[in-house]
Image: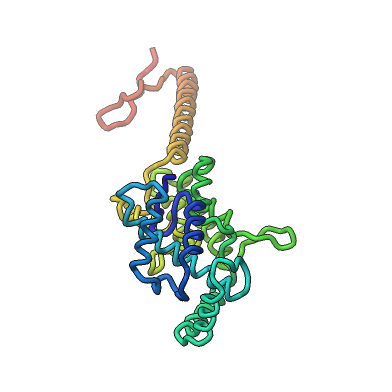
Amino acid sequence: MWIKPVAGKEFLPNKPVKKFLKDQMFRNFIHPWASWTEIPQADRDVWFKEFLGEFSWLPVDLVDLKRAYSFKASKLMSDRFYKLRVGVGKKNWIQDEVKAQLFERWATDEKFIKKREQNKLNRARMDGPSYAGGCIPFSEHKRKIADKGEVPADTIHWAAFEQTHPKEIEGEKCWINAKSQQCAETYQQLTQERDSQIENDPTSSYADNESLFIQAAGGFDKKGRVFGMGASAGELKSSMKRSSGSIGSVAPDDKRVKTLEAKVKEQEAQMKEQGKMILEMRELLNSLMKDKGTRLPPDGDGDADGDPAQTAAV
């Protein structure tokens, strides 16, 4: 099976990679390692080579494959440790003796205790859960939306955000937390202001939907992440750096072109109507002046001072 790393944090497809990592950890977790980095580098290298032999991949992706593999394996360990401590999930992936040694470390290791308390504070500041996409990563939601081809390319992140950040309370759909709600409301306000700008001046440059979403989410943080984008933010930031044009300013798209064409046609129709009215008024004036023995000069004629010359009727 062919796989591709995404932003050094995810894989496409994700499900078979995740299954392989779970099986690999089940076979090899024979010591009370408290984190991915505690596992000897030699062991991690052997596991990675086994991973490379399981899938097909492009040589150009090797560095990103290693980075994404380490990230996913580390996250899987953290998730399993958390479920082990709170007593949920499968417990047969770890030997009883190793599990007992881990619990002893967690209860006595000052470094771990300090980190655990800090994580509690961090979760409290996050205003509860911030993702409702289940075990499917944000990048996979985004890929499925893109494959359907039902939304413009620069709105795929927003469409995926709408799928992964709502919840239901008593049958009513709402945003999963206050931060998600604020992000959504800000994005909708920014897009409305942008659309109004296009309507008033179709020829001006404007921000695309992706840039507006990043702005609504608070921009990139120090680690290059954007709220609501998952690992996709890293890929997006890289593509922005490679782009030679200005970020957020895009060339006219079909919508702008159609709006501009409509305005041109409207102005042409108005000018045509004005020309018709001028001809009708000219004919009427000629008719009235003919009765008085005068007539209007032809278009463009005049005396040296620029005043219209009147000629006597024959």
Asked if residue 226 lies left or right of residue 306, the reply is right
Horizontal and vertical percent position of residue 13: 47, 49
Query: Which colour style is shown?
Result: rainbow
Q: How many marks?
A: 0
Which is more toward the observer, 94 or 206? 94
Left or right: 62 in relation to 278: left
Point out the image quarter for the N terminus: top left
Is the residue 220 above or below the residue 244 in the image? below
Considering only vertical position in the picture, is 152 above or below 241? above
Q: As drawn, is 133 to the left or to the right of 143?
A: right
Asked if 36 appears above or below 204 in the picture, the reply is: below
Eyeballing the image, is 11 above or below 103? above
Q: Position of residue 259 (x, y in %)?
A: 47, 39
58 or 266, nearer to the observer: 58
The answer to whether residue 297 shows anywhere in this view is: yes
Nearest the eye: 299 or 231: 231
Query: Which residue appears at 56% of the width and 74% of the height?
Result: 96
Can residue 177 be spotted in the picture?
no
| Rendering coords of residue 270 (x, y %) | 48, 32
Q: Residue furthest right?
A: 170
- Asked where in the image residue 43 lies, by quadrant, the reply is bottom left
| x and y, in percent, of residue 194 in the image | 47, 52
Residue at 45 percent of width and 74 percent of height = 33
Quarter of the image with the C terminus in it = top left
Pick the residue in front: 236 or 297.
236
